Amino acid sequence: MPTDLRAGIPAHDLERFRAHLLTLADEARRIIRSACDQGFEVKHKPDGSYVTSTDVQVEERLRALIGKRLPDHGILGEELPAHAPGAEFQWILDPVDGTEDFVQRIPTFGTIVGLHFRGEPVVGVIDMPMLDARVHAAFGLGAFHNRERLRLADLGADVPPAQVRLMLSARANFVRYRDRDGPAFDALTRTYPNHRIYRTCYAHACAATGQADATVDYGNHIWDLAATRLLVEEAGGAYRTLQDFHTPTGRVFSAVFGRPALVAKLASLLGESPEAKAP
């Protein structure tokens, strides 16, 4: 088995990165809450999706803080061009994940930040400011929901599918890039009827906390998943990439994550790609 390169990162650096990560999350939360009170501008991207002045403001602020403290690190964000794409350490930013929900004042949107080392996640956070909820983790140091340590128990083999708490992205996510993925959504909803539909990082956070037994999300860019794998694995769960392919808008991933035994069942049902690499 190959050595995990992250194991060579000194513990004091992991603590330093985690502290900076939480500072970034605090700053994003401050900006977003202020925007919810004072208002913001709304526009549409060429693909029809929303982008707001808050998305840009948050990403600009986080980039400035990273550049000041860690100038040798790269930055990849949803709204602005990449900085130092060849750097070993890359901060990956989704300033407002679920911008449509943000625009409509549905409180399940949030900020996603992850730091990756040579493509492997090192620290990560999902912060949902209007729910006053945060899930964060550092490699080898555990995952936390606010201040509570997360420890996912596995799902018993005798739990019937109708009792499994499954979260899914919308069917629109499944067919956004490939119509042929619609049957995957249909198979999931038939097999696991006790499902909930969320299109934001809220569903990812619930998989890490155990509020959902597993989450399946299709059609994501890397910033949508920048923290998810680390959060789930550090909580004791499993993460599997189902798809990894290129589109005109960039590389796209689909994944399943949550309680390990259920993740294995879902990956088998959906057809895990052996070539796919987890972001």
Image: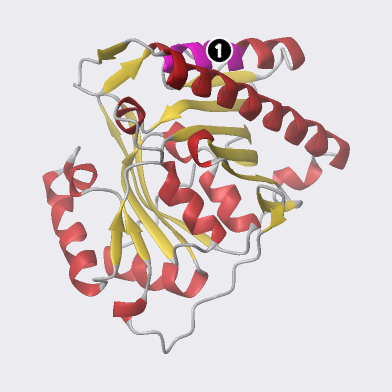
Which of the 4 image quadrants contains residue 46?
top left
Question: In the depicted view, which residue is nearer to us: 129 or 164?
Answer: 129
Q: Is residue 148 above or below residue 126?
A: below
For numbered disc 1, what is the local secondary structure? loop
Asked if the stretch drawn in magenta spans residue 24, the answer is no
Q: Picture coordinates of residue 131 (x, y %)?
A: 50, 41
- Indicate left or right for 204 with 90 as reference: left
State the scheme by which the image is colored.
secondary structure
What is the crowding at mark 1: few (fewer than 14 residues within 10 Å), some, or many (at least 20)? some
Which of the 4 image quadrants contains residue 60?
top right
Q: Is residue 118 above or below residue 81?
A: below
Residue at point 60%, 17% (across, down): 62
* Residue of label 1: 83
Which of the 4 image quadrants contains residue 164?
bottom left
The residues colored magenta run 54-63
- Viewer can see residue 89: no
Q: Picture coordinates of residue 13 (x, y %)?
A: 82, 34
- Viewer can see residue 151: yes
Residue situated furthest bottom in the rendering: 158
Q: Picture coordinates of residue 251 (x, y %)?
A: 35, 32
Q: Is residue 13 above or below residue 81?
A: below
Main secondary-structure element of the magenta-colored stretch: helix
